[in-house]
Amino acid sequence: MNNERTEIYGTLGPSCADIDILKDMAACGMSGLRLNLSHGSLRERSSWIAAVRGAALAVGRPLKLLVDLQGPELRTGNVSMDLEEGGRVLVGNLGIPVPELVIPCLKPGRRLLLDDGKLLVEIEEAAEEGNVFGRVRRGGYLKPHKSIALPGVEIPRPALTPMDRENIRCAAEFGVTGVMQPFVRSAEDLLELREALDDAGAGNIRIFAKIENRRGVERLPEFFPYADEIVIARGDLGNDMPLWELPAVQYETGRRCRESGKPYMVVTQMLASMEYRPAPTRAEVSDIFYAVLHGASSVMVTGETAVGKYPVEAMRYLCETVREAEKVRAAE
């Protein structure tokens, strides 16, 4: 079994972008932080990055910085609204704002998943001015800039957006150590990213290939030569299949990575209840334990530290659980 230390990441956000909070998170054993660039550029988050550097100096060791690019990911616009279960809703510029290239794909009967699948709208019929009507099958409150998924539908988009390229150009300046490429579809996506990093004089930055749909799972071996680490990104991956299939896909993806000697990360909802509660569920702790026991090279929490109420507590539970799993892994 792999007996190397597991890397442990939090996610930067308003709840933890403070030097004292970050210092406490680092003291728990955190290896580094992820910055989601779907919500702002590196320059716009320079004060957050400065806080990370300050925390690293305070604890006497470096903290890695991963950036999550926009890539071909799709998100809603800058609108908040309550989606009442069973209610009818417009999708488009008159209702739930979605990118223009999504509208032609919204055929009757198709499922539109929002915010990592928390919300579900079933498309019913076309409406005026390029909008469509949908029926809310899983309701809740939709916040701005949340993820969009259309299971089984391929929507062509470039691997890197203009904003991605701008962030890559200044990645080295801000001390970025790894770049996460969302929705990797082919080896070409990773080659394009590597070329952009090389052109920016940042060829030493590691590439993390995010597996977020069935296509990525099916083409996984193609990515091994071009990715430094594979990311089993269970949020959108779980939108692209029935949830009960996700654990088997996670296990099989991890197995293939281990057999090929490729490090892999497990991420999404590892301590989701801790966005609102000071202690996790037993199931969440077990999830972390078995991800590490089965060979994950790194694990990460997202909203738990970015916007949650208990970022330090979440990091403490994550780190302590990882260390317990490492003890068992080392003994096998």
Image: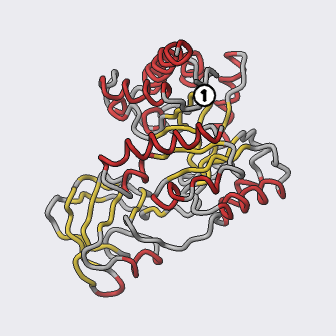
Is 140 left, or right, of 266 in this rendering?
A: left
Of 235 and 79, nearer the camera is 235
Residue 48 figure quarter: top right
- Mark 1 belongs to which amino acid? Glu
Q: Position of residue 250 (x, y in %)?
A: 44, 43
The residue beneath circle 1 is 7
Locate the N terminus and report the quarter of the image it occupies. Answer: top right
User: Which residue is situated farthest in the left direction here?
Assistant: 86
Q: Is residue 272 above or below residue 116?
A: above
Residue 214 figure quarter: bottom left
Measuring 47% from the left and 23% from the top, which residue is drawn there?
Answer: 318
Q: Position of residue 254 (x, y in %)?
A: 52, 40
Is 324 left, or right, of 109 in this rendering?
A: right
Q: Residues within 10 Å of mark 1 (few under 14, many from 20)?
A: some
Q: Circle 1 sits in a helix, a strand or a loop, which is it?
A: strand
Is 62 left, or right, of 156 in this rendering?
A: right
Q: Position of residue 270 (x, y in %)?
A: 41, 33
Measuring 66% from the left and 62% from the top, which residue is drawn there?
Answer: 189
Q: Position of residue 25 (x, y in %)?
A: 54, 22
Q: Is residue 211 above or below residue 187?
A: above
Q: Is residue 178 above or below residue 21?
A: below
Is 265 left, or right, of 314 in this rendering?
A: right
Of 131 and 271, nearer the camera is 271
Measuring 77% from the left and 59% from the top, which residue is drawn there?
Answer: 196
Q: Name the colour scheme.
A: secondary structure
Residue 67 figure quarter: top right
Of 96 and 136, nearer the camera is 136
Number of marks drawn: 1
Measuring 59% from the left and 43% from the top, which residue is drawn there?
Answer: 35
